Amino acid sequence: MRLPRPSPPPPAPRPQARFTNQIPAERRYWVLAAVMLVQFISILTSTIVSTAAPTIVDELHGLDLYAWLFSSYMLASSVTVPVVGKLSDLFGRRPFYVAGLISRRT
């Protein structure tokens, strides 16, 4: 009388690829530098608007329009940021960062 052979163990499950938002250690300084550059460009833009404000108000011929200058700047920024954010979700962030840096530089 023969004994039944034991069935081989089932194959081990393949490890699933894990998606993580952590930045690899070798890229952290590059990412930090890129974020600092973008923040610097943003602050520089605000400084340029503040410096140019008196000239723009003179061309508008009225101090009563001074508030409109900053309101229109903030409104344009508030509309642009969510739109570009959604587009960057769809097409990737790098092209929009590069385009933003190039457009602010010129």
Image: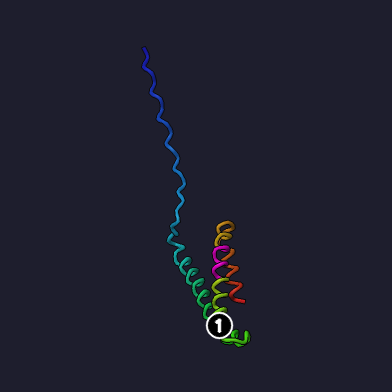
Q: Is 103 rendered above or below residue 54?
A: above
> Magenta span has 79?
yes
Which residue lies at the image location 45% right of the left edge and 59% below the top edge?
A: 23
> Magenta span has 75?
no
Name which residue type carries label 1.
Tyr
Q: Quadrant of the N terminus?
A: top left
Residue placed farthest to the front in the image?
64
Residue 99: x %, y % from top left: 60, 68
The residue nearer to you, when weighing 26 against 77, is 77
Q: Is 78 rendered above or below residue 49?
A: above
| Quadrant position of residue 9 | top left
> Residue at label 1?
66
Residue 15: x %, y % from top left: 44, 43
The residue nearer to you, when weighing 38 against 65, is 65
Q: Quadrant of the C terminus?
A: bottom right
The residue nearer to you, when weighing 62 against 15, is 62
Q: Which residues are magenta?
A: 77-84
Which residue lies at the image location 38% right of the left edge and 23% below the top edge?
A: 6
Residue placed farthest to the top in the image?
1
Residue 10: x %, y % from top left: 42, 31
